[in-house]
Amino acid sequence: MDILGSILNAMDKPPTISDKQRALMRKQREALQKREEEEKEKLRVFRETVEDQITKLMKDNSQQKHEFEPMEKVFRGIIHDVAEVAGLVAFSVGMDGDDRRVIVYKVEFQPCEEELAALRRGEEWDPEKAKALALQKEEEEAESKTTKDFVPSSDYKDKYERLIGKESAKDAARITQTNKQYGFVPSANKKDVRSIEQTLADLQSRKKMKLSHGNASEGNSSSQP
């Protein structure tokens, strides 16, 4: 016997499957396939129902929106898809969980950002309440602006005179006052009042003097032994 044959004989043979086990496995596959087909049929029927409701919304001029019942994510996705195909806008609102639902609007009646934010938080939208809150916000902003422009009616010096005494307050005020003389330089020292012609003439004169001094120095050095 060759080596390969001896190795194959030494290996454990795969377990045999009985007819009963085969039948059980076949039933499990059939049951899984049946559940998948039932789920597909359920989603198909649901899509047709949503399409009918969306069509009614589009044909009814008195309707601005249609709100669906809370449902699972897979069904909400179908509503969004049908609304997009129909040219409408759909929003998922409400908190995550049992309250999550979809509202489909006609394009011309889609909600404002404030209303949509309230619906997504699970709150009821009240236009009158929203107007009151907006007015309150404007009043607070106006009051805040007025506070920034507030000018105190009393001088801080009077306050400190009552707290630490008149002489001490004067000393403190004198220390905190800006020294207006600090760094003061007369304008005559800051600005050259000469004209351009005078400045150029002075520069040329200095240059000539420098050259003459240099020539004189060279003459003295050459005359030395």
Image: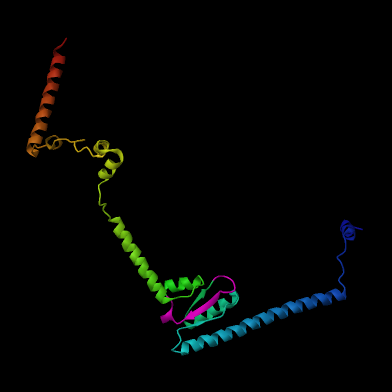
Of the pair 212 and 74, the residue shown nearer to us: 74
For the rendered model, the colour scheme is: rainbow
Q: Nearer the viewer, residue 142 or 163?
A: 163
Instruction: Judge whether 29 appears above or below 137 on screen.
Output: below
Name the residue at 72% across, 79% down.
33
Tell me residue 172's x, y (percent).
Answer: 27, 37
Residue 176 sits in quarter: top left
* Residue 198 in the image, given as x and y percentages of width and height: 7, 35
The residue nearer to you, when weighing 125 against 25, is 125
Magenta stretch? 95-111
Tell me, yes or no, if residue 84 can be seen here.
no
Q: Quadrant of the N terminus?
A: bottom right
Could you tell me residue 26's position as x and y percent? 79, 77
Lateral position of residue 197 relative to residue 159, left or right:
left
Q: Nearer the viewer, residue 32 or 105?
A: 105
Location of the C terminus (image quadrant): top left
Magenta-drawn stretch contains 105? yes
